[in-house]
Amino acid sequence: MSPRARMPRGWTIRAKVATSATAVLALALLVASAGLVLLVHRSLVANVDSSGRARVADVAAIIAADGLQPTISLSSGETSLIQVVSADGRVLSSSANVQGEAAVLPAVPASRVATTATIRNLPIGENGHGFRIYAEPIDLPTGLGWVYVAHSLSQVDAAVASVILVLSVGLPFLVFLVGSAVWVAIGRALAPIEAIRSRAVVIGKDLSQRVPVPVAHDEVHRLATTVNEMLAQLEASALRQERFMGDASHELRSPLTALRTQVDVALAHPERADFRETLEGVHAEAARLGALIDDVLLLARTSERLSDSTAQIVDLDELMLAEAKRLRLRGGIAVTLEHVDAVQVRGLERDIARMVRNLGDNAVRHARSTVGISVARVGQQALISIADDGPGVPVEDRTRVFERFTRLDDARSRDLGAGGAGLGLAIAKDIASVHSGAIHIESRADGHDGAVFVIALPAAHHLPG
């Protein structure tokens, strides 16, 4: 029978644990009780054997002093008997209560060593109670012989019965008492979990709430703390998602509104419309809308983690050389390669190229005259630096500029991200994060105006598994 089939499926954890603990306790007590009864029985029988040995010594002393007499006066009523038997099994002397009876043992022991035996149906004693026979060889005046001493086991049986009675009454009560205690203890232990479950039902509708944390610093405390941390992350993620959806809908609505306005004006006043100019405007807004949709989809895709099946080796030095060449073809800004090391990383080349391109486009848009590019290996990291001599980014805004749909208020506010929607830097940050890296902004080392965007990625053979 499988473990699952041993208990009803509808049982709670409390019922299962309490029942299992009680059953194990009952089984252990039953085995222990059986052992106790057996131990008591053996101990009492050993005492009877010791008494028989002492009685044999007394009989041997009497025979040595007075000779062998027909009757031995050491019997204790109906609870014991004595017989002196010849080597061939004839009764030579006995206690008064078995005078004239045959030997209690049907045959003398084969070996001349002390022997014990338990027999029933003796001519004395109460029916149903056994007798413990102690037989010991002895030298008689007539030759070799045996002394048989028998004691009733009625007192042993009564003592064992009393022990069994006490155990039969006490054990069920003890099992019930312990089972009840286990039931109450488990209920108290599971109460915080039930409180967490009850609160979780409500939290499903309101992520701002938290589950109660018990005072005791135990496993449930750690569970509640972890759940609250997870809820905080979910709440923050939901708020970011809600804000992102609102910002995305606003950004998507702007080009759509511009498209509709141009088309409505052209349709309302066809005689005054310059359809070529209208189409060029529609084309520009459609391109802006398409770029924005591409960026939003890319942001959604970059939330996926890398896997061994998708990651590949990317040569950063070749990628940065290609990026420098692309920026030079745009013209208007000088692009310099300040330092290039041969370094590789693991990841998606397409996404890493998009990250570098976004930062390169951002640098060109804000540079006054020069953009500097470098890639170097420093310890276990590959560092990409893209510097410009533009107005720079204030220290207090160097984290905020990587948020989605963020535009600053100063001279650097124009067109921070791809398509002017403020997504370019957010996309770059997400791509770096997916590749176990990070992006931050520094001031120029020469103290001049401008900003340096630094990408740190794990080098290929140091990338965490």
Image: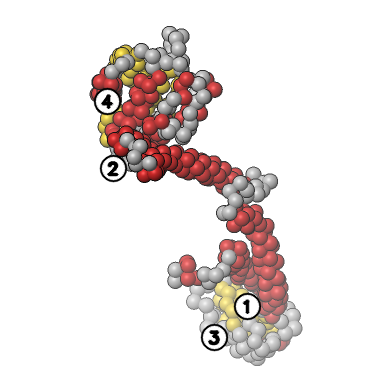
Q: CA distance from mark 4 to mark 1?
A: 102 Å
Residue 190's x, y, as percent? 63, 57
Q: Secondary structure at mark 4?
A: helix
Q: CA distance from mark 3 to mark 4?
A: 109 Å
Q: Quadrant of residue 72?
A: bottom right
Residue drawn at x 64%, y 81% is: 131
Quadrant in the picture for the C terminus? top left
Three-letter amino acid code at disc 3?
Pro
Badge 1 density bin: few <14, some 14–19, many ≥20, Cα 10 Å = many
Dot placed on the residue nearer the N-terminal end, 3 or 2: 3
Quadrant in the picture for the N terminus? bottom left
Dot placed on the residue nearer the N-terminal end, 3 or 4: 3
Q: CA distance from mark 3 to mark 2?
A: 90 Å
Residue 106, labelled with which disc? 3
Please name whichever residue, 315 or 245, is drawn nearer the observer in this view of the structure: 245
**Circle 4 sits on which residue?**
319
